[in-house]
């Protein structure tokens, strides 16, 4: 299952980079849950909404897998997030600035689909790179 789980997570990263939301139902389970500090979204529609928000703020958003490991149906992925802030994002108006931050996401796979993920993204550094002081306390 580990190779299948790794491949599935890679396919999700690729779909996100292509803004291919139509691929989501093949990759995530109907009962999918995404969690990040202070945030939780559920299902295909919830994930699509979250990704749309990020793509609106960073139209050239690119996720790069830096490291991936795991066993069975669990995969831990370290990644880089880069993009140019050309649209409003989390209440921050477009700045035109480029960001490059790191994050980790832990994915759980069952029956050939991702059922649950926990993500930590370095938002404090992202806010700093955007010149925002209100995110400094994150």
Image (cartoon, rainbow, N blue to C red):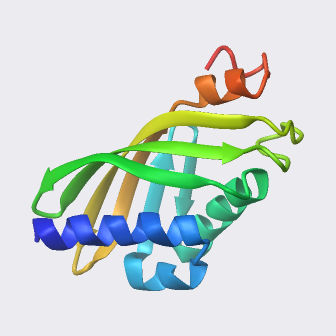
Q: Is residue 36 left or right of residue 118?
A: right
Question: Is 80 located above or below residue 111 in the figure?
Answer: above
134 and 63: which is toward the camera: 63
User: Which residue is pictured at 34% across the width and 65% down the height?
Assistant: 10
Residue 131 in the image: state x and y as whole percent.
Answer: 79, 21
Q: Residue furthest right?
A: 93
Residue 116 in the image: state x and y as whole percent.
Answer: 36, 60
Q: Please identify the quarter of the rendering in which residue 6 is found.
A: bottom left
Q: Please identify the quarter of the rendering in which residue 46 is found.
A: bottom right
User: Which residue is pictured at 65% across the width and 35% down the height?
Assistant: 99
Residue 137 in the image: state x and y as whole percent.
Answer: 65, 14
Rendered-image quadrant of the N terminus:
bottom left
Rendered-image quadrant of the C terminus:
top right
User: Which residue is pictured at 76% across the width and 28% down the height?
Assistant: 130
Residue 80 in the image: state x and y as whole percent.
Answer: 46, 42
Residue 24 seen in this snapshot: yes
Numbered circles on residues, count: 0
Residue 32 seen in this snapshot: no
Question: Is 24 located above or below residue 92 in the figure?
Answer: below
User: Which residue is pictured at 23% across the width and 55% down the height?
Assistant: 75
Q: Is residue 82 left or right of residue 109?
A: right
Q: Please identify the quarter of the rendering in which residue 96 is found.
A: top right
Q: Is residue 108 left or right of residue 82?
A: left
């Amino acid at each position: 299952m580990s190779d299948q789980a790794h491949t599935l997570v890679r396919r999700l990263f690729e779909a996100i980079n292509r803004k291919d939301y139509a691929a989501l139902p093949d990759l995530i389970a109907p009962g999918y849950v995404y969690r990040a500090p202070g945030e939780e979204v559920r299902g295909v529609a919830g994930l699509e909404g979250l990704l749309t928000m990020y793509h609106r703020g960073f139209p050239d958003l690119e996720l790069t897998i830096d490291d991936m490991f795991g066993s069975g149906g669990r995969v831990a992925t370290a990644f880089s997030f880069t993009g140019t802030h050309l649209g409003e994002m989390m209440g921050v108006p477009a700045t035109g600035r480029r960001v490059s931050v790191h994050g980790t996401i832990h994915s759980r796979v069952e029956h050939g689909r991702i059922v649950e993920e926990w993500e930590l993204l370095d938002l404090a550094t992202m806010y700093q790179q955007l010149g925002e002081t209100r995110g400094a306390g994150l």
